[in-house]
Image (cartoon, rainbow, N blue to C red):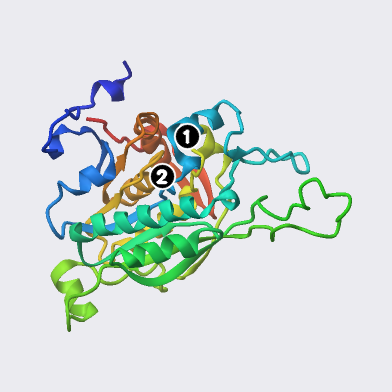
Amino acid sequence: MSRSSAQVISKRRNSQSVEKDQFQTCHIGHAQIIHTDCFEWLRTLPAESIDAVVTDPPYGVREYELHELERRAVGGTGIWRIPPKFDGHERSPLPRFTALVETERQVIRNFFRDFAQALLPALKPGAHVFVAGNAFLSQLVFGAIVEGGLEFRTEIVRLVQTLRGGDRPKLGENEFPDTCSLPRGCYEPWGLFRKSLPNKMTVRECLRKHGTGGLRRRSDGKPFFDVIQSERTPAREREIANHPSLKPQSFMRQIVYAALPLGNGTVVDPFMGAGSTIAAAESLGYRSIGVERHEDYFKMAMKAIPLFAKLNISNGSSVLIPDDQIDLPLR
């Protein structure tokens, strides 16, 4: 058993009444990570106890079901498309979102509407929620979250050059050489939502009472921008955690930094994955809670979070800080 596994302090038990101390939990520095389904966990929280949410969720469809992720991990295609090499570069597996039928699109609507409804009571008034999307499904996902009760504030655009899109028609490459099926992907949309302020409460009053309602300005005093230039996730970070939708620390730290307007409170990631949000919060000295239902990803996050948090971000790229400069205790 690894050191981190040995220090996992509790395990969830089957019962009709789910209690917080029945979830498998591990503490890493200022962070707490929990192995359970986030819907179950949210039901255990006191009202108005979450300051901010930053998350890159699955889409509640076949691409992110456990058996499909397992097939992807061993190189099988399944519902994941493995594109060819391009100019010598390996291309990441892509979910076949364009193959969704209406019943699957309805699953997505229901999933995100239900998620917003489950999250809403636990959010403080004025708490912001950042949700990663993709260009094909963002209009569906963001609309469902609004149906669930959150305000749509704006869209954060992560500018990132990828190898997605831009392909010639399948099996028609020679017949239609001057055509592409979709534009080359150069951005990733993030929805920014907020729990409504109480009637007639101003942002100033909300900041005073709840510490929420606004976004933290950048460290240089400039406002938080809705367009952020970003690198692709560096190979160094992918070596730490082989997660299909891993975001770079250089980007995540900007999002997480903005989420707490006064620099106080707790950032929550209900779909933690490999822990990039939690690591970003840890690097900034923020308290955080990550929830992950897949055991493999939970174990991955236990190992990855301390390593991600040690990365020194300089000029938009990551450099590993020597071990003797940072120590994140597991307990």
Residue in view at x 56 percent, y 25 percent: 74
Q: Residue at label 2?
A: 276
Q: Assign the C terminus to one quadrant of the image.
A: top left
Coordinates of residue 114 in the picture (x, y in percent): 30, 55
Of residues 81 and 246, the one nearer the viewer is: 81
The residue most toward the right is 175
Q: Is residue 249 visible?
A: yes
Q: Quadrant of residue 75?
A: top right
Q: Quadrant of residue 258?
A: bottom left
Q: Secondary structure at mark 2?
A: helix
Residue in view at x 64 percent, y 56 percent: 161
Amino acid type, mark 2 = Ser
Amino acid type, mark 1 = Ala
Q: Is residue 320 visible?
A: no
First in sequence, mark 1 or 2: give its number: 1
Q: Is residue 31 left or right of residue 193?
A: left
Looking at the picture, does residue 173 appear above or below residue 243? below
